[in-house]
Amino acid sequence: MAATNESNATTANRTVVEARSDRELVVRRTFDAPVHIVFEAWSTPDLFKQWWVPKSAGMSLEECRMDIRTGGTYKLVFRHPAFDQPMAFFGTYKEVTPLERIVWTNEESEEGALTTVTFEAHGDKTLVTLHELYPTQAARDEALKGSAEGLPEQFAQLDAMLDQGSLREGA
């Protein structure tokens, strides 16, 4: 079973969202930047805040705490004008291998996924693969509704930030 959604962003790179199995979601995109710069954008809170929230969602990321090391924790607090209370997402980094892999839990509910992001060098480009394993098919299906729309936009925002070149050496 594989439902795939490809998104044409503003660049030649496309984000591919795939329901790989009843409980798995896989998102891939190649970025025009070397691995160390893409990894920095994922692992530095001030940079992460610049691209993680899809602008079309109308939300803000008010708090972003990331202790990116194996055994470290994170907490992201979002606010949306339609809701009185903020939404908090949190979990634990199960594995962090700099420049290669980040694995974290999503512990805000029993339906949270185990998320793995890998970074693969392809010359001066980086293939990012985000893999989420959900406890149930229903949880995966619910996430797919939002991810199919949100993650391509998030990855396009990361691509745009990387394209600005402010993270590159000498920029």
Image (cartoon, rainbow, N blue to C red):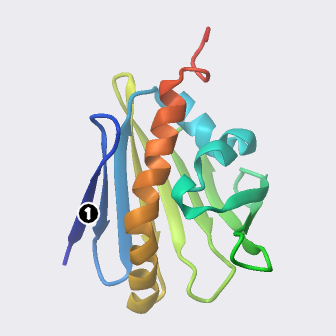
Secondary-structure class at tag 1 = strand
In the rendered image, is residue 118 in sight?
no
Residue 167's quadrant in the figure? top right
Q: Closest to the observer: 62 or 46? A: 62
* Residue occupied by mark 1: 5
Relative to 117, is 32 on the left or the right?
A: left
Q: How would you rate the neighbour count of disc 1 (Cα within 10 Å): few for under 14, some for 14-19, many for 20 or more? A: some
Q: Residue at x 79, y 80 (%)?
A: 84
Relative to 67, is 15 on the left or the right?
A: left
Q: Closest to the observer: 5 or 84? A: 84
| The N terminus lies in quadrant | bottom left
Residue 78's quadrant in the figure? bottom right
Q: Residue at x 37, y 58 (%)?
A: 27
Taking the view exactly as shown, the residue that stands out farthest to the top is: 170
Residue 116 image point, x, y percent: 50, 60
Q: Residue at x 78, y 52 (%)?
A: 67
Residue 89 image point, x, y percent: 70, 71
| Number of numbered discs | 1
Compared with 55, 76 (above or below) is: below
Taking the view exactly as shown, the residue that stands out farthest to the left is: 1
Residue 151 image point, x, y percent: 45, 58
| The C terminus lies in quadrant | top right
In the rendered image, is residue 35 in sight?
yes
Residue 148 image point, x, y percent: 37, 66
Type of amino acid under label 1: Asn
Q: Residue at x 51, y 30 (%)?
A: 162
Q: Closest to the observer: 140 or 117? A: 140
